[in-house]
Image (tube, grey):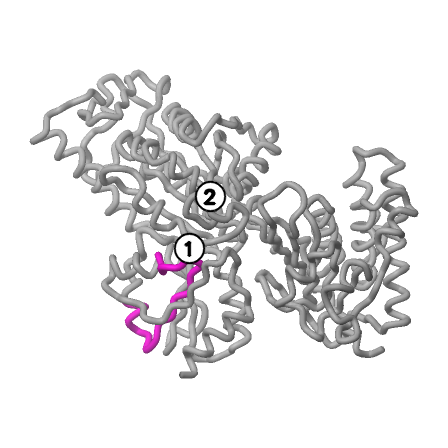
């Protein structure tokens, strides 16, 4: 009986696995929200096939006494909702995993006598309530009761979730939820399935969002009032979030016919004075190359969010990879300044996106925010965000007669006017132009001076680079390098390893590099870079601009994020040689 107990664990990993359309995401949203509201630390991430229905998808939910925000291989409780669930997660299922499922779904996949198996006839129970669709609510109730959730919190969520379906559906879900609670009570008594996770001691109500929402909130805080995009996984969540809140924050939202139209609409809005944004993924950004160059030559600010997924081509459209750094770095024709940011935490996503709009406005350049599928779909609770720390910085000039949009200045940044604000005419041209904005083919003087003027801005951009975060001692012997979404897994892995002479340098601005990058690297006896791509794209960028080559690389490119366990193993293997 005691073998089913999880009382000794401070961190429980629950994985639900089943077909698309089976309600797995409903269970994820229910559990993360109600458990977080009841005082637990939670984190959730998902992996799913590129199909509307069928296939086999999974979601991992971690409930912990401490803050958690990374993916782990470990499965403590596995809930299998279809016949291919076991096969899908076989590598992660161990003798310690508690498997909860219907006999018909698992009997041909594993030797039940050699695993901790709890057989529950979900489908029959759900059919008795009215439909097999209620099996996911039964599962939600079971898990909630194992964590001794306040039932009223659960029922409040269900009422809000199914309010549009009518009272009968709400009551059916209540019945399914109660059935799950009853099953859990029986398992506690008969199987000794006990969980003793401590609730967190939080003074303030915390936020529970995913990466897409955090980027969206940052855009709102940055003053975004125009977004035009063509939907593309996994970036669409940002467009949906801003559309949902458009009326509250006076945001004009437009779904374009393609990505070419989207970026050109964004540039048109920015020319008129909007703080504009587009959101896309690698394939969509590939179509925006000419628009990016248009931003460069017309010196029109725009924020471009690129949620990476594996390529080339369509690749794995619902998986994750850090494979588009070189795409956004080298895209566009000709030379012009750009800024590339890559948040590592949900807090980073909010503050960095907010800052992106200020940077774009100040330097009149495109600012690109790189995330990825893992980051977009990752949920965890965070403390309240400090709005008092941020401000919207506007750099628009009221024009006078004789205004020159592309006036030569010492730092290359011309006063930016917009049509209708002042007496001056605001001319823009996608061909090479004079200070007044007229097309020119004066090759020896104007062309040279304009190219130099635009590149002068890059020297100003370098003065505003966000410094990398150094976690750990500044007297390190081993230095781990990471950027973007690898932050949470690397941080948790190093907490487990707990070697005093290892530190972690995380970059949330990857271009241009901070001026102290080379100095920080050369201080270490050993440098290890960790990236979710096959060629170490950030490592190549570091070598290009510092001359420092990182020999130790931990790379992953199968469409999945790094797990905490694999990083612990691989870092130890290098460090303990």
Q: As displayed, is residue 535 above or below residue 524? A: above
Query: Residue visible at 45% across and 29% down?
Result: 258
Q: Position of residue 38 (x, y in %)?
A: 76, 57
Label drawn at residue 415: none
Q: Which residue is mark 2?
A: 314
Q: As displayed, is residue 444 above or below residue 552? A: above
Q: Position of residue 284 (x, y in %)?
A: 43, 37
**Do the numbered discs 2 and 1 sit on residues whose CB atoms are within 8 Å?**
no
SS label for mark 2: loop
Q: Is residue 488 left or right of residue 379?
A: left
Place residue 61 in its image quadrant: bottom right
Q: Which residue is mark 1?
A: 508
- Residue placed furthest toward the bottom: 577
Of residue 297 and residue 4, the one placed in the foreground of this image is 4
Q: Is residue 446 left or right of residue 151?
A: left
Of residue 558 and residue 391, the one placed in the foreground of this image is 558
Magenta-highlighted residues? 519-537
Q: Position of residue 469 (x, y in %)?
A: 42, 62
């Amino acid at each position: 009986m005691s073998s089913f107990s999880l009382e000794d664990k401070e961190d429980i990993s629950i994985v639900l696995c089943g077909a698309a359309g089976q309600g797995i995401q409903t269970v994820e949203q229910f559990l993360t929200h109600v458990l977080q509201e009841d005082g637990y630390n939670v984190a959730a991430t998902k992996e799913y096939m590129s199909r509307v229905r069928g296939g086999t998808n999974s979601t991992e939910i971690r409930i912990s006494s401490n803050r958690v925000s990374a993916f782990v291989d470990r499965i403590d409780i596995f809930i299998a909702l279809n016949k291919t669930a076991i096969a899908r997660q076989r590598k992660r299922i161990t003798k310690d995993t508690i498997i909860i499922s219907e006999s018909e779904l698992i009997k041909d996949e594993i030797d039940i006598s050699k695993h901790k198996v709890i057989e529950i006839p979900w489908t029959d129970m759900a059919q008795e309530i009215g439909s097999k669709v209620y099996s996911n609510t039964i599962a939600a109730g079971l898990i909630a009761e194992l964590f001794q959730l306040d039932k009223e919190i659960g029922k409040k969520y269900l009422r809000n979730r199914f309010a549009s379906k009518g009272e009968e559906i709400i009551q059916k879900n209540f019945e399914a939820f109660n059935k799950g609670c009853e099953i859990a009570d029986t398992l506690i008594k008969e199987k000794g399935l006990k969980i003793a996770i401590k609730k967190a001691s939080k003074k303030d109500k915390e936020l529970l969002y995913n990466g897409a929402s955090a980027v969206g909130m940052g855009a709102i805080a940055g003053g975004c009032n125009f977004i035009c995009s063509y939907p593309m996984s996994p970036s669409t969540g940002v467009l949906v979030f801003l559309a949902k809140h458009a009326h509250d924050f006076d945001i004009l939202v437009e779904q374009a016919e393609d990505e070419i139209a989207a970026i050109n609409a964004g540039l048109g809005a920015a020319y008129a004075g909007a703080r504009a944004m587009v959101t896309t993924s690698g394939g969509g950004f590939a179509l925006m190359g000419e628009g990016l160059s248009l931003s460069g030559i017309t010196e029109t600010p725009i924020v471009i969010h690129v949620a990476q997924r594996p390529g080339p081509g369509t690749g794995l459209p619902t998986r994750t990879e850090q494979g588009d750094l070189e795409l956004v770095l080298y895209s566009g024709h000709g030379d012009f300044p750009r800024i590339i940011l890559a948040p590592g935490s949900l807090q980073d996503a909010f503050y960095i996106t907010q800052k992106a709009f200020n940077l774009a406005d100040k330097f009149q350049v495109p600012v690109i925010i790189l995330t990825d599928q893992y980051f977009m779909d990752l949920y965890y609770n965070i403390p309240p965000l400090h709005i008092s720390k941020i401000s919207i910085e506007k750099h628009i000039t009221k024009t006078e007669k004789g205004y020159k949009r592309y006036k030569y200045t010492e730092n290359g940044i011309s006063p930016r006017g917009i049509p209708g604000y002042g007496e001056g005419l605001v001319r823009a041209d996608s061909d090479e132009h004079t200070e007044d904005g007229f097309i020119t083919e004066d090759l020896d003087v104007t062309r040279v001076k304009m190219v130099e003027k635009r590149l002068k801005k890059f020297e100003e951009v370098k003065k505003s680079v966000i410094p990398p975060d150094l976690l750990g001692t500044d007297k390190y012997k081993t230095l781990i390098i990471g950027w973007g979404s690898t932050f949470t897994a690397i941080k948790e892995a190093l907490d487990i390893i707990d070697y005093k002479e290892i530190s972690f340098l995380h970059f949330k601005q990857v271009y241009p590099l901070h001026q102290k990058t080379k100095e920080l690297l050369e201080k270490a006896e050993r440098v290890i870079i960790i990236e979710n791509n096959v060629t170490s794209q950030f490592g190549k960028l570091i070598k290009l601009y510092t001359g420092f080559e990182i020999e130790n690389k931990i790379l992953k490119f199968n469409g999945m994020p790094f797990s905490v366990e694999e990083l612990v193993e691989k870092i130890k293997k290098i460090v303990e040689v």
